[in-house]
Image (cartoon, rainbow, N blue to C red):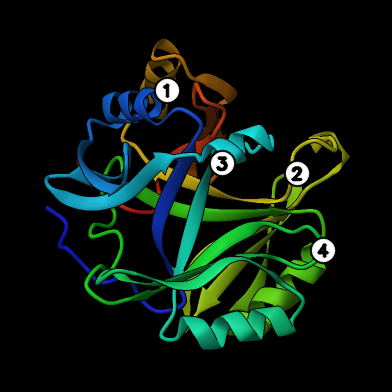
Amino acid sequence: MAQIHAPKLLSFCWSELCSSNWQEAKAFYTQLFDWGFDDQPIGEGAYYTMLQKHDDDIAAMYQMMPQQKDAGAQSQWLSYIAVDNVDEMAERAAALGAEIIAGPHDVPSAGRMVMLQEPAEGAHFALWQAKEHIGCKRELEANIPYWHELATRNSQKSRAFYSALLGWQAQDKPMEGMDYVLFSARDTVVAGMLQMTEEWGEEIPAHWMTYFAVLDCDAMAEKARVLGGQVCVPPTDIPQVGRFAVITDPQGAVFSIIQSVMHDIEP
C-alpha cells in the first residue's frame, strides 16, 4: 500500500468539486471510484464532504450556493497548489494581473486558502497553506488525483504567469498533434499545459483538468456512462504516457481518468 505523504510545496495537493447537486454527485463519484465519505457540517443543511480511500481524505465536494446557480455557474473541479504563505502569494498573483475570487481566509484549524483566476480570463485555481490538513494523503494509487493539466487560450501568457508566481520551470514536450509543456517545481514535474485551438470552440473556458488514476480506463469509462456520466473523449492511447478518457459527470463537471504506463499504480 502506498504511504501517506505530505504534498510537496508548489505542487498540487487537493482537488475539490463544487456541484450543482451535491447529493447526486456524491452518489456518482462514490460508486464510480469506490470512495467512502465524511459529511462535515459547514452551515444549516450544508456539508463539506471529504471523499476518502481507506479512511484517508483524498478529495472533497460541496453544494453550490443558490446564488451561484442563479448566476449560471457550472459544476466544476478546483485544483489547489501547496504554498508556505498564502497571503504573500496572493499579493504576488494580484501584482501579476490575477483576480482574487475568494480569500485569503482561514479554514478553521485545517489551513488557509485563496482562490484565484489567471490574468485575462484564464483558468481558476487555488493556493493552500496547510495547518492540520495537508491535502490528499495518498499518491500513485488507483482512484485518486494523479495529474493536473492546464488548457489555456494563451500558453505564452500562462507560462509566464506560473513561472513568475510559483517559480515553475517550463519545458516544451512535443507530443503527437500538439505542443505540450511540462511544469516543474524544484526539479520535479508537477503539471502539464496545452494550448486550446479553434477546435475547442468558444464556450469552453480555460481550465485546470484533474486526472484520476485508474487501473482500467475502458472499464471505468463504461462504468461512468452507466452511472449517468457522459464520455466526452473515449479511451485514447497517448504513446509512452497511458490511456485516458474525458468524462462529464451528471451535473456537468468535467474530469479525466488515466491508466498510466509511466508509474506503477497500486490498487
In the rendered image of this protein, does residue 150 appear above or below residue 40?
below
Label 2: state its secondary structure.
loop
Instruction: Report the residue at 34% width, 37% height from top.
Output: 214
Residue position marked by numbered label 1 in the rendering: 218
Amino acid, disc 1: Asp
* Residue 60 point in image, percent of width and height: 34, 47
- The answer for how far apart the CA atoms under marks 2 and 1 are is 22 Å
Q: For residue 44, say whether it is visible.
A: yes
Quadrant where the image shows the C terminus: top left
The numbered dot on residue 177 is 2
Label 1: state its secondary structure.
helix
Mark 1 neighbour density, 10 Å: few (under 14) some (14–19) many (20 or more):
some
- The answer for how far apart the CA atoms under marks 3 and 2 are is 11 Å
Residue position marked by numbered label 4 in the rendering: 120
* Residue 170 point in image, percent of width and height: 65, 74
Mark 2 neighbour density, 10 Å: few (under 14) some (14–19) many (20 or more):
few
Label 3: state its secondary structure.
strand
- The answer for how far apart the CA atoms under marks 4 and 3 are is 31 Å
Of the numbered discs 3 and 2, the one sitting upstream in the chain is 2
**Which residue sits furthest right?**
198
Residue position marked by numbered label 3 in the rendering: 238
